[in-house]
Image (tube, helix red, strand yellow):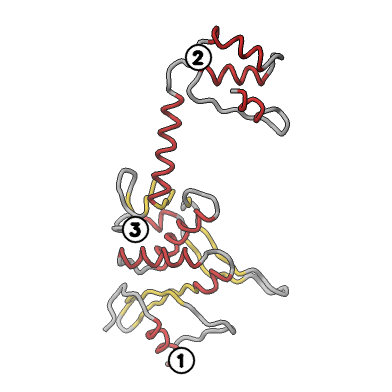
Amino acid sequence: RVESGIKGNPLAVDQFFEGGLIHHLGDKPARFEFCVRFHARNIIIFRFMDWHALEDAGHFASIDRHFAELMTNLSGESAPHFKLACAEASAAIRRGDSCVDLSHARVYDLAPENGAPTERIAELPALAQLLPLLSPSVVVGRPGERKPLILDGSRLYLFRYFDFERRLAHALSSRAAAGPGMDMGAASPLLDKLFPETGGQRAAAETALRRGLTVITGGPGTGKTYTAARI
């Protein structure tokens, strides 16, 4: 007995292959992720996602897939797009981001070989279509909740990295709001010694001494490290 929304398993896929209902083209083994939906009497719609191809094309690593599988198992949500969004949240960390922005749709292609046309592997719709999957999920929370995934606007975070970002923002805001710093009259003799020439470096040092938080910027060779060391 198959019920709407139940997640398939390899045995079921094999049975459909053996029955001649599904034909897989290519010399690589298929690794499909699918869900079953009743559309009408005796009509079943399958939506497939080849995770083997997604990993081979470099879109995801195996840890992203395993994390996404854990989220789908904990939530009971079988829709492939839910799993894909979870995998994107994991992959974002490997790419150097703290979250994935779901405001725009994403497409996943195979790199063309020998002049062959690009092959589309999968698509992730924009947030509006993902919200019905993400919002009610027991593994997706909003800011202030403690759940494995946090959805803040269009940005989907792993909880740990949302917490890192929140704590960093709080620390920066607290330092920026700190009261007056050093007495510049007392600091002036030392500034004269360390920065005998007036200019941007001394001005940056004076600003840093007055404030709890200072950001010093400049191109290569402008003396950022020199200034920071003397501060």
Q: State whether residue 226 is above or below residue 52.
A: above
Q: State whether residue 197 is above or below residue 171.
A: above
Earlier-in-chain disc, 2 versus 3 = 3
Earlier-in-chain disc, 2 versus 1 = 1
Along the viewing direction, whichever of 85 and 69 lies nearer the viewer: 69
| Number of other residues with Cα within 10 Å of mark 1, as a class: few under 14, some 14 to 19, many 20 or more | few
Q: Are marks 1 and 3 in contact (CB under 8 Å)?
A: no
- Residue in view at x 26 percent, y 84 percent: 1
Along the viewing direction, whichever of 140 and 46 lies nearer the viewer: 140
Query: Where does residue 119 sit, x and y in percent of width and height?
Result: 60, 71
| Tag in front: 2 or 3 | 2
| Number of other residues with Cα within 10 Å of mark 2, as a class: few under 14, some 14 to 19, many 20 or more | some
Q: Secondary structure at mark 2?
A: loop
Label 3, on which residue? 132
191 to the left or right of 35: right
Q: State whether residue 57 is above or below residue 43.
A: above
Label 1, on which residue? 20
Label 2, on which residue? 182
Residue type at mark 1 is Gly
